Image (cartoon, rainbow, N blue to C red):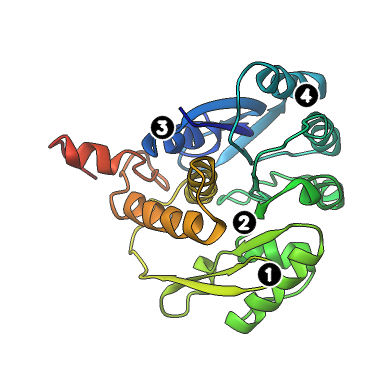
């Protein structure tokens, strides 16, 4: 059995964070484990509050799992502060043969709640980018990292190259926020660019899409796939999950992580 570890915050509404990560891992045939960085108070409408875990607890969750179980990929999501970032880097730095690490640089929730403290951005780049095999910023996150606007595909390619130069080995700049034609992501492996296109889906129920996409990349890399193959298969998965998203709550509902399982079982989807 292939195993993936998510290091991220808990979403009490179940659509994002470690809940989304674990559902994604299981849907894609990978056993999921978690190291919880924070507990959030949130629903489909907004994030109301965050309580971080103590850095030592985060560090020890990670090291005790690596000490016991073979882990084939790691996904890092919400890490809000410098002490948490340093704890994760310290724990992963003790691993002799670190598996692929997929870093989703979560900065702000859809409702506008800051999920990464402003002074922690430099620490994220300094400590976690060099450990990451893949970094997956959306356009607002890429703009924040680089301090400039990204207006088109050429800007996205330049951003991917610059983010790679910050220490990440491979980069996926997600183009969903561009609002120009199809949704196009830019993939860069340090040498080669590829564009990954998908049609836009008209739905408000997109809670947890970033978490789910990065976790799907981690799951496919845990199964031994190359960067380009893993991202392509992850894109197919998140597209299906969004197409079958669930109208739960009074805000942005979650994607349907088990849409394919439900379909094959003859159950209703979406």
Q: Which of marks 2 and 3 precedes in the sequence?
A: 3
Judge whether residue 152 can be spotted in this image. no
Q: Which residue is mark 3?
A: 26
Q: In the picture provided, is 146 more to the left or to the right than 18? A: right
Mark 1: give few (<14), some (14-19) or many (20+) Cα within 10 Å. many
Q: Mark 2 = which residue?
A: 136
**Numbered disc 2: secondary structure:** loop
Distance between the alpha carbons at the discs numbered 4 and 3: 24 Å
Number of other residues with Cα within 10 Å of mark 2, as a class: few under 14, some 14 to 19, many 20 or more:
many
Within 10 Å of the Cα at label 4, are there few (<14), some (14-19), or many (20+) other Cα atoms?
Answer: many
Which of the 4 image quadrants contains residue 201?
bottom left
User: Which residue shows up at 80% across the image and 33% down it?
Assistant: 84
- Asked if 199 appears above or below 34 in the picture, the reply is below
> SS at mark 4?
helix
CA gap, disc 4 and disc 2: 23 Å
Contact (CB < 8 A) between labels 3 and 1? no
Give me the disc on residue 160. Answer: 1
Give the residue at x 72% y 72%. 161
**Which residue is identified by label 4?**
59
When the figure is inspected, residue 25 is found, relative to residue 140, above or below; the finding is above
Of marks 4 and 2, which one's residue comes earlier in the chain?
4
First-in-chain label (3 vs 1): 3
- Distance from disc 3 to disc 1, alpha carbons, whole Å, reads 30 Å
């Amino acid at each position: 059995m292939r195993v993936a570890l998510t290091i991220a915050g808990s979403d009490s509404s179940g659509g994002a964070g470690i809940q989304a990560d674990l559902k994604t891992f299981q849907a894609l045939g990978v056993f999921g484990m978690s190291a919880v960085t924070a507990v959030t108070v949130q629903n489909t409408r907004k994030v109301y509050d965050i309580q971080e875990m103590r850095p030592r607890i985060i560090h020890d969750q990670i090291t005790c799992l690596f000490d016991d179980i073979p882990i084939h990929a790691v996904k890092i999501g919400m890490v809000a502060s410098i002490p948490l970032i340093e704890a994760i880097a310290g724990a992963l730095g003790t691993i002799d043969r670190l598996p692929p690490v997929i870093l989703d640089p979560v900065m702000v929730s859809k409702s506008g709640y800051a999920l990464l403290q402003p002074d922690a951005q430099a620490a994220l780049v300094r400590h976690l980018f060099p450990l990451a095999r893949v970094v997956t910023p959306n356009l607002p996150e890429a703009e924040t990292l680089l301090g400039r606007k990204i207006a088109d595909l050429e800007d996205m390619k330049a951003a991917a190259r610059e983010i790679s130069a910050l220490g990440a080995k491979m980069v996926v700049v997600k183009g969903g926020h561009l609002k120009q034609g199809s949704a196009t992501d830019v993939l860069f492996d340090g040498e080669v660019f590829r564009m990954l296109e998908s049609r836009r889906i008209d739905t408000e129920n997109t809670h947890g899409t970033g978490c789910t996409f990065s976790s799907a990349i981690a799951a496919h890399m845990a199964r031994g796939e190359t960067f380009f193959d893993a991202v392509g298969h992850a894109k197919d998965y998140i597209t299906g999950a969004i197409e079958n998203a669930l109208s739960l709550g009074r805000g942005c509902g979650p994607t349907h992580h088990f849409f394919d399982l439900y379909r094959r079982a003859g159950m209703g989807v979406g």
